[in-house]
Amino acid sequence: MSIRNSKNCNLRGKFKPLATLAFCLSVSLSLLPIASEAFSIAVISPPPVQQPVDKVQLENLKNHDVIVFVDASHSMAISDCAGQSRWQWCKEQSVALGDTLKVPLGTHLKLVAFSENFKVYPDINWNSVAGFFEKNKPTGNTDATRAIKSQLNQYFAARKALQPGQTMRPLLIAMITDGSPDRPLSLKETIIEATKQMNDSNEVAITFLQVGSDVKATRYLQELDDCLVSHKARFDIVKTKTFAQLSQTGLVNALLQSVSPTELASK
């Protein structure tokens, strides 16, 4: 389920555009730095509950190319995930992801580690997912824009190079992150520009999976989820999951739900 303000963003009637605009503006203003937010309060979250995998959702995911972006910035070392660091929590969940998806997806998974720079691991060996987290340690800032822009550009370039009769698989991007990016406006504009290159609404889907308890990050991701179209995006392609939601479903099911018919219908 998306992070959604049903009172403000689901209004009916002639006041809906104005109400939505006011809500999105209020969220944007709330992202401005506040002195008290310079201090981080660690919130101990309950351990994740791994729900059974939905076979229909798993079958649907097989029709996509999947890229998992993992935030490797310094704040991922914070321990507020049931006594684990955010990085360790992601490692364990990603290993479970690999165990579930290595048969149906084959070599269609790509991992990207991003902080101040980014590194792409194409067609990663499922058995080496744990090694990915050993090679990459939390450090630096959070430049999500360059990482996601590089992969979106690559996708659209490949589509442009298709021969007659060839088709592209839909792209699913899962962005695992714990905070707001260094350039929040730039990331939003990058996603909006990507929607203008899409031929239909199902071509690209982006799900932000928040790890940890950064309230400012939650507000920013909520804006991406609810307000892209009001900011001139052609399609609403972003969904978000809070850490509370991830703790209930686990990373595997959160990814599967990203492309499920039920999730798409709720947008």
Image (cartoon, helix red, strand yellow):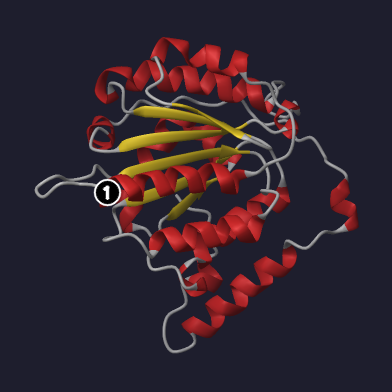
Residue lying farthest to the right in this orientation: 35
Can you say whether 267 is above or below 160 in the image? below
In this rendering, position of residue 224 left or right of residue 218: left
Instruction: Tell me the amino acid under the disc marked 1.
Output: Arg
The answer to which quarter of the image holds residue 124 is top left
Q: Is residue 208 visible?
A: no
Q: Nearer the viewer, residue 94 or 266?
A: 94
- Position in image of residue 250 (x %, y %): 48, 29
Q: Number of marks in the image?
A: 1
Can you say whether 186 is above or below 145 in the image? below
Label 1 CA crowd tier, 10 Å (few <14, some 14–19, many 20+):
some
Q: Secondary structure at mark 1?
A: helix
Quadrant holding the C terminus: bottom left
Q: Nearer the viewer, residue 197 or 91?
A: 197
In this rendering, position of residue 188 left or right of residue 39: left
The answer to which quarter of the image holds residue 256 is top left
Which residue is pictured at 48% across the width and 57% down the height?
191
Which residue is pictured at 58% across the width and 49% down the height?
145
- Position in image of residue 10 (x %, y %): 46, 71
Read off the residue under disc 1. Answer: 159
Residue lying farthest to the left in this orientation: 165
- Position in image of residue 107 (x %, y %): 31, 22
- Position in image of residue 26 (x %, y %): 68, 72
Which residue is pictured at 51% across the width and 23% down the height?
93
Q: Is residue 103 visible?
A: yes
Which residue is pictured at 90% across the width and 56% down the height?
35
Can you say whether 120 is above or below 10 in the image? above
In this rendering, position of residue 142 left or right of residue 21: right
Can you say whether 233 is above or below 77 in the image? below
